Amino acid sequence: MDIDRIQFWSRAVAWPIYVISLERAAQRRAECQRALDAMGAPFAFFDAVDGARLSEAEVAAAYDAQGNARQYKRPLSLPEIGCYLSHYLLWKRIVDEKLDGAVILEDDFEADASFKKVIDAIRSAPLCGALVKLFSRKRVTGVTVASLGGPRRLVAPNRVPGLTLGYALDRTAAEMLVANALPFSRPLDMDIKHWWEFGLPVLVVDPPPLRIGELGLRSCISPARIAAATQANVGAIGRLMANLRYQLDYNVQLFHARADGRRAVRRIRAQFSDAGGG
């Protein structure tokens, strides 16, 4: 699909579905195509930024290495930087093309039979200025914001789960991310766990309609992440201390963000109440 057709299609479809994938990832793309076509869920591939092909200037413009040393536990790998930029460019597309919102998937997802129904419910929900995660490894604990039908609920989690396998966001949420994302110093999923830095509440669908597919177990990011940590040359004790420092700092920030979280829950619940939902 060429860029002009993608732009026309995205303007014509309410909350289009995008799958981020490297152009060369033929097997992953075929699996995504098969899964979404079987569910009758129209989508478009979005060519991921290949971090290995970024120039030093492009990396420096997007990645804050000094901030990383202060705010995270290890340097980011080039694939992690490319991954973040891929999502950023899609947020920018939502804003620039004035889309109502979008669903963004990474190409190693598997979806259950309810995926399209869940997406339709999110598209029709009265959300404004929130990101909705479609995946979590564990059962989510937190405040139920609304029902999505059957056993599924929309939850404001006590802790935002990691990974960005799939999520939905409206244009206001995309604007908040675009305004605050660059330059970044953490991996994307870790940045979203720091939602207060964006002023952006994060909700989670529980139970999730997505899971990590078999191809996700052979991610190119994981080996590169390990290599980047090793190349930092701080030793096992140094890595342990950096991780402890990061976890302590995160927990302190999360504690101080509780009031913001409660206000966000009240606001989102009011949106559903005003719309007669939830």
Image (cartoon, rainbow, N blue to C red):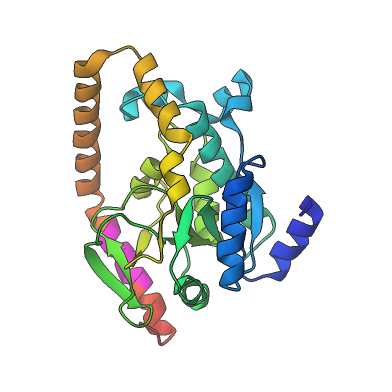
Q: Nearer the viewer, residue 111 or 267?
A: 111
Q: Nearer the viewer, residue 244 or 206?
A: 206
Q: Is residue 185 left or right of residue 78?
A: left
Q: Is residue 140 left or right of residue 109?
A: left
Q: How many numbered circles does the render carry?
A: 0
Quarter of the image with the N terminus is bottom right
Question: x, y (%) of residue 28?
Answer: 57, 48
**Residue 142 among those drawn in magenta:** no
Question: x, y (%) of residue 247?
Answer: 22, 36
Q: Tell me if residue 159 comes above or below residue 55 in the rendering.
A: below
Q: Tell me if residue 19 comes above or below residue 17 in the rendering.
A: above
Residue at 36% across, 41% down: 190
> Magenta span: helix, strand or loop, mainly?
helix
Residue at 75% across, 58% down: 7
Q: Which residues are magenta?
A: 261-268
Q: Tell me if residue 38 comes above or below residue 278 in the rendering.
A: above
Q: Nearer the viewer, residue 115 or 251?
A: 115
